[in-house]
Amino acid sequence: MARDAIERGEVDVSVVVPAYNAATHLEESLEAARKNNRISLEIIVIDDGSTDETAGIAGAVAMLDRRVRLISKENGGYGMAVNLGFSEARGRYVAIVEPDDYPAPHMYDDLFELARSYDYPDVVKSSYWRLIAQRDGSERRWHNDYFRAIRPRRQPFTLVEEPRLLRYHPSIWSAIYRRDFLEKAGIRFLEVPGAGWVDNPFMVETLAQARAIVYTDEPYYHYREDLPGSSSVTLPWETQFQRWHDMMDVLDRLDEDDPGVRAALAVVGFRYVEKALAANPSSAEVRDGAQRIFARLDPGIIAGLDRVSPSLRELAFALRGEEAPKLDGFAYARSLVGAGFHSLAINGPAFTASYLGRYVQALKGRLDLPHRLPPHGRVGQDL
């Protein structure tokens, strides 16, 4: 029946799995996706030149389930693999599963049925679970940061109505995308070697161009954080900065000048800058890269970013060669308290306790920045 539906072009959701040396978790990921049984589903595994047992595992699963298809290719990176999967997809919607992660049973059943109830919007976005390894080898799952924080006034909505979607992890895999929307808008992934954080510009492209987004707080996708060797751990600051510029380029190309949308992406830019500066406080190259990011931000938006520390905003104005206006430190303190209470409410005291030390160290690094970096002067001067 599944194969007949595929051949008739009646696939509801095509799940694309870009896999490179993914043997450790791939079978778990595919088995979870196969549990969707209320819709017509196809699963397309793109073996991106793996040198381990990835292709063998995917092929064995395909022998058991005709909905699973394996395509092998030479290694070309995450973006190229997903693009190939999209071009092969026949579903009304497409989705992405990274092979280190896994969806909850019936994730795509539920999201497609939600899409149908809203007359097939461009994007259906959900919450997700963060999987964090414990010292004893087990995994704990926690709600992601935007759980209960994204509260659109109506469904469907647009990014301008809920720009906070841009502030958090791109989590492009916690959604389904209408395939003809992607095709008509010309949305594809950047094709660069490796993973390269190409999910970031894809997130902005889809959300900024979507005329109808539906959101559910129900967490389905299980995302493994901080895996050794993952791009979230190893990606150089230069690439992170470039991806931020790629995201800004999308907004510029689309003439998206909504202050809320721009402010949300500015928060992301500050987050990348503060991490890079804290790790490389004496690097002229990082300072130069930070200056280029700050130069693309509206000074009024910088001044109003209560979620960014006053010291970092002062640094931004200094690198722009401008005098900083008076910034409200109490507003920043309120935002920290609010974020703390939100985390406590959604994940409880155990999560807060487990991350308190890391948060304090990160905060200390941010507060120390003005003392380790000259607060004024142009990039290129002696540091």
Image (cartoon, helix red, strand yellow):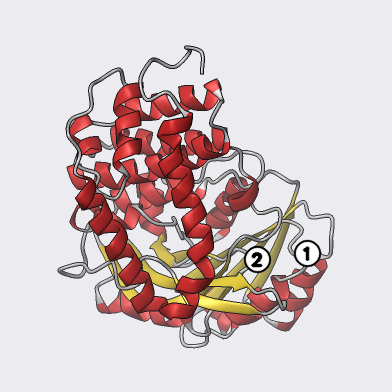
Q: Residue furthest top?
A: 381
What residue sits right under mark 2 in the picture?
A: 99
How would you rate the neighbour count of disc 1 (Cα within 10 Å): few for under 14, some for 14-19, many for 20 or more? Answer: many
Q: Tell me if 104 is positioned left or right of 152 in this view.
A: right
Tag 2: Cα neighbours inside 10 Å, few (<14), some, or many (≥20)?
many
- Residue linked to disc 1: 54
Number of marks in the image?
2
Please determine whether, in this image, residue 18 is positioned above or below residue 324: below
Q: Disc 2 versus disc 1: distance between alpha carbons? A: 10 Å
Is residue 329 at least partly visible in the picture?
A: yes
Decide if residue 230 is on the left or right side of residue 186: right
Residue 151, image quadrant: bottom left
Nearer to us in this view, 348 or 148: 348
The residue sitting at 73% across, 63% down in the picture is: 22
Res 136 label: none
Residue for point 44% across, 82% down: 109
Q: Position of residue 236 (x, y in %)?
A: 61, 38
Q: Position of residue 353 (x, y in %)?
A: 49, 73
Question: Is 244 positioned to the left or the right of 36 in the image?
Answer: left
Residue in the foreground of this view, choosing between 320 and 202: 320
Which circle's residue, 2 or 1, is located before the other in the chain?
Answer: 1
Residue displayed at 53% across by 71% down? 354
> Looking at the image, is mark 2 or mark 1 nearer the viewer?
2
Going by the numbered disc 2, the residue's amino acid type is Pro
